[in-house]
Image: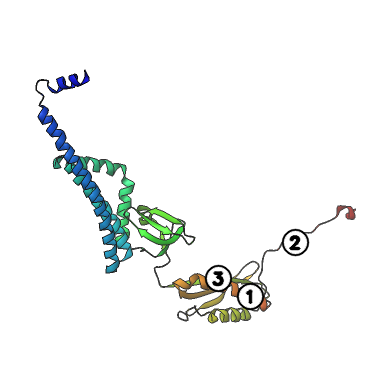
């Protein structure tokens, strides 16, 4: 009964059964073609991305520009692939243009933050406040720049945590770049008691600084009494080192200064609390 009804429906007046079947077959071929284009195109994009990455490495292009261009190229190729698939399904070019315009307007209004992140990525690429490999600090986060992509950048902290920050935030924030210069200055303050001999303290600390092999002689290290605090004299040292040696020199001077001052019998003041206990019974 169902088969008979289906045949009667296919034989109604004005219905071209052959045209209907031809359209289904035609759309089926288009659908298969679109799927083939999608699969082949996806593998092609993956292959192209690897090829571009290898080409950038061979050409020694700056890593900052390389990561940004790789990300941008990948997104652009996937967008073109999507348009090609839609065209294969028979959608007219004019309809696609109209649809893209409408979608673009809607996406632009909905994703204003993403567009600002894209603009921020372009600004970072052009102005170069930092590059891949630099150690930076931004909004209480610090780490080595691992990637600069189209919409965001990634930092790796010293304890190997990955922090993803939107490019718009990076472009509009105060960024401290510790790797911008090849040299950094190690500033330290040493507190000693008021009973200390000033010249002796200066002699001991100056000898310690000059003996460190990674402290640069030019500019010349600085060491002077810089403050007379409430309970101590403060000596400040300023020593220039190569940027990669900063923390090693910092910790070395902190440890060595304590040893030298202790050996010389020079007191390092610290807060003291005296507690007196009275026996009320004895007072009576």
The mark nearer the N terminus, 3 or 1, is 3
Is the residue 172 above or below the residue 205 in the image? above
- Which residue shows up at 14% across the image and 37% down it? 26
* Mark 3 and mark 2: Cα distance apart in space: 32 Å
Element type at marker 3? helix
Horizontal side of residue 56 vs 258, given as left or right: left
Going by the image, does 252 lie left or right of 136?
right
Q: Are marks 3 and 1 in contact (CB under 8 Å)?
A: no
Q: Which of marks 3 and 2 is in front?
A: 3
Q: Mark 3 points at which residue?
A: 251
Residue 261 percent location from the top left of the image: 64, 76
Residue 274 disc label = 2
Considering only order in the chain, which callout, 1 or 2, is on the residue closer to the N terminus? Answer: 1
Mark 3 → mark 1, Cα distance in angstroms: 13 Å
Residue at the spot of label 1: 259
Q: Farthest top residue?
A: 1
């Amino acid at each position: 009964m169902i088969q008979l009804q289906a045949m009667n429906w296919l034989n109604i007046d004005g219905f071209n059964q052959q045209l209907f079947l031809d359209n289904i077959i035609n759309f089926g071929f288009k659908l298969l073609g679109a799927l083939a284009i999608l699969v082949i195109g996806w593998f092609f994009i993956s292959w192209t991305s690897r090829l571009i990455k290898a080409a950038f490495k061979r050409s020694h292009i700056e890593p900052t520009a390389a990561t940004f261009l790789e990300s941008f190229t990948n997104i652009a190729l996937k967008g073109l692939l999507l348009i090609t698939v839609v065209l294969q399904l028979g959608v007219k070019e004019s309809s696609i243009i109209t649809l893209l315009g409408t979608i673009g307007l809607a996406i632009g209004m909905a994703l204003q933050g993403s567009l600002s992140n894209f603009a921020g990525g372009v600004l970072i690429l052009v102005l170069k406040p930092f590059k891949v490999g630099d150690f930076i600090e931004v909004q209480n986060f610090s780490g080595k720049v691992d990637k600069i992509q189209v919409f965001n950048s990634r930092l790796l902290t010293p304890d190997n945590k990955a922090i993803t920050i939107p490019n718009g935030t990076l472009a509009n924030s105060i960024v401290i770049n510790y790797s911008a210069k090849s040299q950094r200055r190690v500033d330290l303050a040493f507190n000693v008691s008021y009973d200390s001999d000033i010249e002796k303290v200066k002699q001991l600390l100056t000898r310690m600084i000059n003996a460190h092999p990674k402290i640069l002689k030019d500019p010349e290290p600085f060491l002077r009494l810089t403050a007379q605090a409430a309970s101590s004299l403060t000596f400040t040292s300023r020593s220039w080192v190569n940027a990669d040696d900063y923390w090693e020199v910092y910790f070395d001077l902190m440890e060595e200064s304590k040893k030298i001052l202790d050996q010389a019998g020079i007191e390092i003041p610290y807060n003291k609390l005296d507690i007196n206990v009275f026996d009320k019974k004895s007072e009576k």
